[in-house]
Image (cartoon, grey):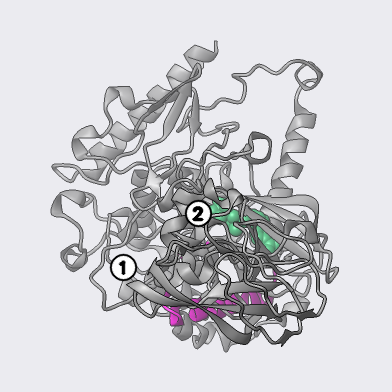
Amino acid sequence: MKIHIQFLRSSGKALNVFIGRFCSKCTKQEDSATSKSQTTDGTCIHGLIAPSSKDELSAVPEVAGDGRNTEVPNVQLKEKPVLGFDPPRKPRARHRLKIWISTRHNGIIGRYGNKLDLGFFKGAKRLSAEHLNTGWPDWLVTVAPEAVQGWAPLRADSFERLSKIGQGTYSSVYKARDLRTAKIVALKKVRFANTDPESVRFMAREICVLRKLNHPNVIKLEGIITSPVSQNLYLVFEYMEHDLVGLAATPELKFTKSQVKCLMQQIFSGLDHCHSKGILHRDMKGSNLLIDSNGVLKIADFGLATFYDPESRQPLTSRVATLWYRPPELLLGATRYSAAVDMWSTGCIFGELLAAKPIMPGRTEVEQIHKIFKLCGSPSDEYWQKLEVPPTGMFKPLCQYNRCIAENFKDLPPSALVLLDNLLALEPEARGTAASSLQSDFFRTEPLACSPSDLPKCPPSKEYDARLRQEEARRQRRPESVRSGIENPRENRAAYGSIKPQRLQHTKTRFNSAHLNPKDDQLTLATEVQPLGFDSTWNNGGNNYMDHHEVPERKYRSGRLANSNISRTKSSDMFKPESTGVGNIVPASHNKEMGVKGPMVDYKGKSKIVNLSGPLATQDGNIEDMLREHERNVQEAVRKARCIKS
Ligand SMILES: Nc1ncnc2c1ncn2[C@@H]1O[C@H](COP(=O)(O)OP(=O)(O)OP(=O)(O)O)[C@@H](O)[C@H]1O
């Protein structure tokens, strides 16, 4: 059988390799392909063809072009075969190129046959050479080959898309059926700009992180759907019926004490695994905790996760974690931090389960840090000394707050209070680890954690479903004229800072994706989400923290919007008069690491970047002045928005 390499094309049944001078099909690709796949004598070695057939292949290739024939022994093709190159150990100018055929079986790539020795191969990157033409798109293997190393892409046509089940900031998630196995899976269509290497690298990091993890309480990446000519990627995950926010928003559902313990135990177990693999999640929150129909909780959404080395002095971005779950050191701009950031967020989730409401729902970074100090107390002098942020980047509240976690959660059993108190320690090193939390008295005292199968059974529920339900209810409540009539385009616009923002059009991507399907990717971000429900016997019936602190309606997806609407700017840029926003605030895209700009205010079709919240820095360090100024700006934005509306 003839083996014919063609550039990025499927050839149907045969496995064909063409080795010869540029063929007519290849010449157009010359620029992009030659540097990677040209032999020293100018021979073109393009492309892999992965035939769809599962036939047995008994191949004695007839090598065309340069006239060399090479024997390949019988190959039993269990799955799609791929053809690869042996990369040089180090990038070298000249490398003896060998070709191999492999097939993927149960996720493992096995190699077959003798290598076809094709002589010298010029200038190859170690990994990209291996992946070149193995069915992955060029924009991926050239930028982030490590993300797909050893894997073959899955085909889109082997899945049947059933319904949309989730909408993230960077993705749309669909329920689908794997047609080969009939298994139900979740397909996450990741949003990024494939023309921008930074954006591809950022997206690929999520894949690398996911591939490193293997634990019952961490979501498993089962494969990646793409094709050589595709601009998109779908990540294939096991399907999970619920997320913690959606589950808790299920009417009538209240978690019992042992159910809360069961949930927390699973969270800590998954987190311990991540941390033991040197991975920080950096976006722990209820909507990223998925729960299957057997009650097994899995940590998901590793879009902001990163590898970390406690010894490394490499700075990390502080612009991570959803605002309500963001630890003080990140709010204060620390760029060297540890797994303790996830411990803080987990503390906020724990507090939310106990209080049945988000415990620190700040609208801006300034407000968030203020809420933290009010609940957790003002930091000590030692804290400020240890905090590794530029001195101009901090402020010290003039007013001293006492720590009042115990008072605010006074009906909690001591073991729960101790754990919560540890997790919400201002000093990162005092928060303990996921492993030590698992050993805490909380999990050893009665009632013990129930088994996951004893978690409440209810129909599939996601934050997304809850949002749809609430949208529908709101729609029903609206006057008939509005429901049936033409909507006022301004109706949904909200000024940032308004207590009741209505809807926000979502345009955020990982970087600026130029390949959005507008229909697919637009969404309404700001909707009400029920707080996590909890057996009220652990609340003190009206006297706890959450009862006498105003909690704005939870409009934004678990605070993500607030996260994205904050920009860290020079202190001189803070609270400029023109920085008050009117119109529709569009969530900003990511920062330095993620391409963050300030929040964008779309007013009459014109977008401009504004800063409703600035860095947590004041020259004189007076938080009260800062908050007053901040509140004035927010009010001003609301006033202007109202004027424009009327
Ligand atoms: N494996 C899965 N099974 C079922 N639903 C899922 C799965 N993965 C994600 N979802 C749903 O899709 C939503 C968005 O997914 P995910 O959080 O991974 O995307 P994202 O774009 O990174 O979101 P975020 O805005 O939280 O960063 C989740 O909140 C969840 O409801």
Q: Which secondary structure class fits the magenta region best? A: helix
* Residue designated by label 2: 139
- Tell me if residue 107 can be seen: no
Q: Is residue 602 left or right of residue 597?
A: right
The answer to if 267 sits in the magenta stretch is yes
Is 432 or 443 nearer to us in this picture?
A: 432
The answer to if 634 sits in the magenta stretch is no
Q: Provide the secondary structure element on which disc 2 rests.
A: helix
| Residue depicted at 20% across the width and 58% down the height | 389
- Tell me if residue 65 can be seen: yes
* Residue designated by label 1: 337
Q: x and y percent of residue 371 in the render?
A: 39, 51
Q: CA distance from mark 1 to mark 2?
A: 32 Å
| Residue depicted at 54% across the width and 82% down the height | 442
Q: Which residues are magenta?
A: 255-284
Q: Is residue 152 left or right of residue 99?
A: right
For badge 1, the amino acid type reads: Tyr
CB within 8 Å, label 1 to label 2: no
Q: x and y percent of residue 285 in the render?
A: 54, 60
